[in-house]
Structure formats: structure tokens, C-alpha cells
Amino acid sequence: MSKKIAFLLASQFEDSEMKEPYDKLKEEGHEVVIVGLKKGELLTGKNQKAEYTADQGIDDVKPDEFDAVVIPGGSSPEALRMNPGIQNFVKKFDEAGKTIAAICHGPQILMSADLLKGRTLTSYPPLQDDVQNAGGKFVDEEVVVDKNLITSRTPKDEPAFIAEIKRALQ
């Protein structure tokens, strides 16, 4: 059954961490929607290998319209994390127990939304102290699932990350 998935994105994302899950989930027949700060904004990867246009702005979407949210890494989460709309969006997902998948620096948004207390997760390893300071338990593994939260570290973890997202969507 087809699901609707939001990708939270700003420029300077890690190219493959956006492209791989986006392409694979689209191939599976899911509806993928790129949600940026502003609809129509051109978003460029930090390695200039991928470019997307925001389908929707964060103020134009409601969490209940989606089944899951994916947060690619790179510098994109840093650009999104202080936006109240972005924070509220992921909080509503967590309250509803819907899938939140974050890779690399993606958990920075979850830190700012105060969603890591008592959760076990992974991220880009240098964020370990930040995860712990936000109340989370950091583990250095390719993919970690804690209830509705799926996290991974780096591009080399993408196959495991994508497999867990697909499993969660079944």
C-alpha cells in the first residue's frame, strides 16, 4: 500500500542521504513530498550532485497528511532545526507514533524539538555529546530503531537505513 512521506530539506544536504532513500521509496510506489522552508525553493546538495525543488513549504503542510518523515543529513538539518514549524511538525509525528527517520545530522532537528529524552539512537558520530546532552542514549551502529524512530550515521549506512524505513512503512 502506498504511503505519503515528507522529506524535510534545506540546501547543503548530504546528496546521497537524500537521493538514495527518495529514489528507493519512489520506486516502491510511495508518494514522496519535499518539504522545505518555502514552496518552490531550489535546494542543492553540498556535493552539487543532487538538486531538488521544495514541493511544499513547512507552513503549507500538516503532519496528519503524511505517514512518515525522512530527515537527510549534511548541513540541511542545521538550517531547519530552529524553525518552529519544523519542530512542531516532527513533534506531531512523534505524538502520533508515526515513523521519523533521520540520518547523519538529521537528529539535530529532533534535539531542537526536544524529542530525544530516554530514546536510543545513532547519528553522525561527532554529534554523540549533543545526543546525550539532549537526553538521548547514543550508540554507534549502522541503524537503530527505537519505537517510531529510525536513525543512521553516514552514507555507508544508507542500505540498512532504507531497509528499516521500508519495513516501517509495511
Image (cartoon, rainbow, N blue to C red):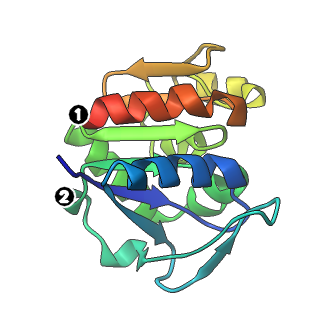
> Disc 2 residue type?
Asp
List x then y, in percent, for residue 30.
Answer: 31, 54
Q: Quadrant of the C terminus?
A: top left
> Which of the numbered marks, if any, corresponds to residue 87?
none
Mark 2 lies on a secondary structure that is: helix
Say which of 108 and 167 sits in front: 167
Q: Is residue 134 left or right of residue 26?
A: right
> Which of the numbered marks, if any, corresponds to residue 170?
1
List x then y, in percent, for residue 23.
Answer: 50, 54
| Picture residue at 32% right of the left edge, 38% below the top | 99
Mark 1 closeness class: few <14, some 14–19, many ≥20 residues within 10 Å = few
Q: Is residue 73 visible?
A: no
Q: State which tag comes first along the sequence, 2 or 1.
A: 2
Q: Is residue 150 above or below residue 138?
A: below
| Picture residue at 50% right of the left edge, 76% below the top | 54
Identify the residue position indicated by label 2 in the image: 64
Q: Is residue 85 left or right of residue 48?
A: left
Say which of 137 and 47 sits in front: 47
> Disc 1 residue type?
Gln
Q: Is residue 147 visible?
A: yes
- Residue lying farthest to the right in this orientation: 47
Mark 2 closeness class: few <14, some 14–19, many ≥20 residues within 10 Å = few
| Of the two numbered discs 2 and 1 in the rendering, the one whose residue sits closer to the viewer | 1
The answer to whether marks 2 and 1 mark residues whose Cβ atoms lie closer than 8 Å is: no
Say which of 16 and 7 sits in front: 16
Say which of 155 and 138 sits in front: 155
Location of residue 87 (image quadrant): bottom left
| Picture residue at 34% right of the left edge, 55% below the top | 5
List x then y, in percent, for residue 113.
Answer: 45, 46
Location of residue 145 (image quadrant): top left
